[in-house]
Amino acid sequence: MKLKLTSSCLVPTANRHRLVRSLASRWAANGLLRTHNDLLRADNDSLWAGNDQSFADNDSSCMRNDPSRQDNDPSCARNEAFSMRNIRAFSLVEVLVVVSLMSLIVLALMAVFTSTQRAFRASVTQSDVLEGSRAAMELMASDLRAMTPSYGTYYYGAVNFSVTNNANYSDPLVQSLPGSTYSRSNLLQQVFILNHQNNIWWGVAYAVSYNSSGDFYSLYRLQYPTSGTNDPTGIFNSQTVQNFFLNPANGGSQLLSGVVHFTVRAYDTNGTWIPYGFAVGQTNSLKQTWFFPLVGGEAGLAMYSNAVPASVELELGVLEDRILQRAESRPTTALQAQYLSDKSGNVHIFRQHVSIPNVDPTAYQ
């Protein structure tokens, strides 16, 4: 700092020299004082760096007591920069732990969602099976209730009711029962029912197609003649009905898929299963009934003249759709049977007992 004296000063020369020396000494004292203050601030900065909490308190008090020092005092600026450098963040280990926990939570939620979706699909599948099977059972029961004796002659005349095993179905599907050493045999039978209304006669036939491509274990229905006829004699032995039994998809209407078991049992007026105790062939008890050999514990029969069952028991075994599709994808019949051999738990059994109103009691005397 330099002192500039002009001629405008009216102070005498002696006094002027004393004034200069006094000012110089004061400026020197002030300069020493500022140097001392700077050293104190540097010492304080080192103390604050060793103690974060005291540094933060001092910094906040600096700004609270004198806001103007924020711009004028460089120590406040240094304190603020230092406090920003000491803000803590998450470490890599902490981030990895959080990500792992979130992954476990997401996996648990996915497992719950998958099980819920599987249960929903199972319930939908079961509902479809129940709905379709009940509709097919009601349709067959309606056709059975309309059964009427034709009062024809012998087997090659008008057949009122016939139950035989499916054509070309020689090996029943055998399935093991869960939790047991026993097994069950699924049989497939074909049924013919003679119906009558006023002077019109027609026949209704049911059969299962089990080995056709794209038509795996499907139940079919045939009505012949479509518009009816006045003579019921040749309906059962017609080429249309017999071809339907050989190939149900030929002329028949598909009712239900996945039918691996279909049997029909006829009962007399006493509620006794008709084939029980009867010899194979024509019997004395029912002269208008012809019996066929037993297959899988079930006997086939054909009734004519005034003989019709007093009641009929229907039994239907329907396989779930997803199991049916997987079995159908197998290339051979042997592989299909092998896959279905342990899937008895996926077969839904339906049974219904139907009374025949047009039964003639004299046929059982």
Image (tube, rainbow, N blue to C red):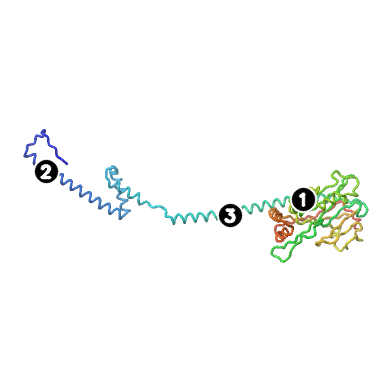
Alpha carbon separation for disc pair 1 and 2: 125 Å
- Alpha-carbon neighbours of circle 1 within 10 Å: few (<14), some, or many (≥20)? some
Which residue is drawn at the image coordinates 16% and 47% (left, top)? 29
Lateral position of residue 13 relative to residue 152, left or right:
left
Residue where numbered disc 2 is placed: 22
x and y percent of residue 74 in the render? 27, 46
Residue 170 visible? The answer is yes
Residue 229 shows which numbered tag? none
Alpha carbon separation for disc pair 3 and 1: 36 Å
Residue 136 shows which numbered tag? 1
> Looking at the picture, which amino acid does disc 3 mark?
Val
Mark 3 or mark 2, which is nearer the start of the sequence? Answer: 2
Q: Secondary structure at mark 2?
A: helix
x and y percent of residue 254 in the render? 77, 49
Lateral position of residue 265 relative to residue 343, left or right:
right
Alpha carbon separation for disc pair 2 and 3: 92 Å
Cβ atoms at labels 3 and 1 below 8 Å apart:
no
Where residue 343 sits, quadrant-wise, is: bottom right
The C terminus is located in which quarter? bottom right
209 or 118, which is in the foreground? 209
Q: Is residue 308 above or below residue 74?
A: below
Which residue is drawn at the image coordinates 85% and 47% (left, top)? 224
x and y percent of residue 1 in the render? 17, 41
- Alpha-carbon neighbours of circle 2 within 10 Å: few (<14), some, or many (≥20)? few
Residue where numbered disc 3 is placed: 112
Q: Secondary structure at mark 1?
A: helix
Q: Is residue 67 above or below residue 133?
A: above
x and y percent of residue 80 in the render? 32, 47
